[in-house]
Amino acid sequence: MRLLTLISGAFALALAMPASAAPPPLSPADVFDLEYATDAQISPDGRAVAYVRHSFDIMTDRARANIWVVDTRTGAQRPVVSGTASYTQPRWSPDGTRLAYVSAVDRDAQILVRWMDSGATARVTNLTQAPGGISWSPDSTRLAFTLFEPDSPRPFAPMPTPPRGAIWASPPKVIDRLVYRADGGGYLDQGHTHMFVVAADGGAPRRITSGAFDDEGRPEWTPDGKRLIFSADRNPDHDTKPNPDLYAADLATGTITQLTHRFGPDGEPAVSPDGRFIAFTGYDDRYRGNERVRLYVMNADGSNRRELLSGLDRDAANPRWRYDGRAIYFAYDDKGTGKLGVATLDGAWREVASGLGGGDPGRPYGGAEFSASRSGAVAMGVTDPAHPGDVALLGAKGARRLTHLNDNLLPFRTLGAVEPLAVTSADGTPVGAWMVKPPGFDPARKYPLLLEIHGGPFTNYGWRYSVEMQAYAAAGYVVVYANPRGSTSYGEAFANAIDKNYPGPDYGDLMAVVDAGIAKGFVDPARLFVTGGSGGGVLTAWIVGHTTRFRAAVVAKPVINWTSWVLTADEGAIIMPYWLGKAPWEPGAQAEYWRRSPLAYVGNVKTPTMLIDGEVDYRTPISETEQYYAALKLAGVETAMVRVPDIGHALVTRPSQLIAKTQYILAWFARHGGEPVPGSGSTATATPAAP
């Protein structure tokens, strides 16, 4: 009833407004009032969906993750657990009586189980590391999970014992693995991730796997509860050539049986309700920049593997069996829109819902979250340009939203209208693109244009909500974003157009997007701006080295020099053979590395260019930003370097950091002919069109 009251109140107030008094645009501080849903898990009987509800605390500048349950018939909601701790991974017991989840306070993360009829809750683990991939046994008596176990440190060299009371320096750290640090995780502890099983009412966890290998993802139980199916990289050269396969662990004997054998990653196993088949995703690795992730099914012993969806030129994700075992649900992105499909075992498939997505609403990336019940009901996360992630129920007519998490905010703000933008590149290639118009858009005026470029490069933007795009539009910019070649969701050939050639044709595609925006007639061609992060930072730096048409640019967390990136990034050496083909010291490699490095074109840059990066970014290390900053300074280009303390490649993990990112970008553009920055006390105005 409270939700219905909020909605009714919102519409009543909106109707009471004078016709001329449109709601104001979103303000920077509105970020703290946004909420979004992730990890929608439907109960076995299909009557309820548990999900993680994300909100933000303006006093602590922190995100909160609480678990709520929504009734699929009435839409009524109630919290399961809420507070300042982080509550994630809600998972229903197969009998529907309990909900397991992970509760984390600082570094103490444990598995808890809640009895849904009484509300009684029990902590069932006492772990020293955070558990992942929790999964119930079919009889609802046990929980499987993965856990990182640090190795016992061994002294590298003998050292004398310090005298009693002496204070010596900390000992040196010895690193002997190729991947020794991870963005967001810092320098890695030596150790490996293994599988464990614990009784659902508590007790000592029992180790299932061991050795110098890592188990990945969520363990999948067989229906008889005797085996766990899982993905792991147990190959001898797993440190330098990752290649996970599927395995089965016998819980009685501890025997590990390898089920798939090929060069290429296999993961996301899903066992059919009768235990006869295993669905999974993977591909044959051909050292290309991008490979289409395919959906397979095989017998439970690993025999008779066959590909489904051979006619669908899109990546498949998150296979889940339909209740009757005759079909498999899967997620895929198609031209920037998340979709849910269902495939039968003969390979036939069809789309059953569109709008799949949600998750972090900062930028319009996709998602593949959904779950299926034994009753046949399916819950999914959904989004569109006007709504951050909500929970929906799949019905005969598509997805029906069960939650409306932002109806106490967004009806009282005027959003920038988002519409598709028709673009054809110079060579005739169609390019998927969108335009966001400023709130209160007037077609008789001339607006500055802001091109925002996605990262990856092998991912996609799309028909989804974006805080950043709306912030730029609210500041008075026509915002354009696109999926140039290299983006996913348009087929394997489209993505691999930049294989060993990045940057490449994506530059021309982005220029065509800008031209299409100008052709609309309400864009001022003398006020063009460009920004992008990660892969978008690479392309932004490439753009200012190849054209002077932009008034100002902001390059976020880029790669500037492919040689230094390969040798310093957390995953650079692993990605190198896929993106660059050769190691930097191999014959002929340096000329190609340099040709593709934005640093090579600094002499051409005339555009005022600001840089922004996290100080502990290990994915595109801040040394890349520092190189470009120094080069721009030496070349006499107006520049500034913004360093965000204590943050990695994400650049944004707290609400104030998201606000700061957009405000700093807008402030740089304002200095160079852009619109006044919201919150600065000035009113943004568009340039009147010439008579």
Image (cartoon, grey):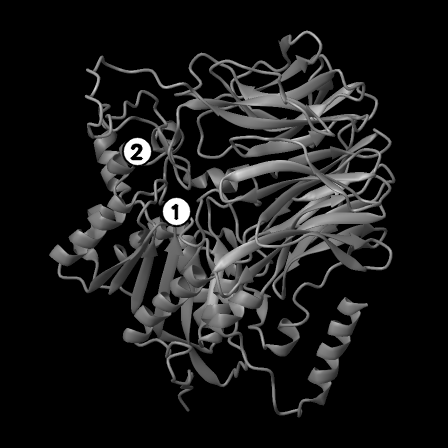
User: Mark 2 belongs to which amino acid?
Assistant: Val
Q: Which mark is residue 566?
A: 2
Q: Amino acid at mark 1?
A: His
Q: Position of residue 298 (x, y in %)?
A: 71, 19
Image point 22% across, 17% down: which residue?
Answer: 161
- Measure the C-alpha gap from mark 2 to mark 1: 16 Å
Percent coordinates x, y for residue 433 in the rendering: 52, 59
Q: Is residue 428 above or below residue 573?
A: below
Q: Which quadrant holds residue 364? A: bottom right
**Quarter of the image that includes the C terminus:** bottom left
Residue 4 versus residue 184 in the image, above or below: below
Label 2–label 1 contact, CB within 8 A: no
Graded by Cα atoms within 10 Å as few (under 14), some (14 to 19) or many (20 or more), the crowding at tag 1 reads: many
- Looking at the image, which is closer to me, 619 or 580? 619
Quadrant where the N terminus sits is bottom right
The numbered dot on residue 443 is none
Q: Residue at x 48, y 35 (%)?
A: 290
Give the total number of marks visible in the rendering. Answer: 2
Element carrying mark 1: loop
- Residue 636 position by quadrant: bottom left
In this image, 599 relative to 130: left or right?
left
Query: Would you say residue 282 is visible in this rendering?
Result: no
Q: Residues within 10 Å of mark 2 (few under 14, many from 20)?
A: many
Give the residue at mark 1.
Answer: 649
SS under mark 2: helix
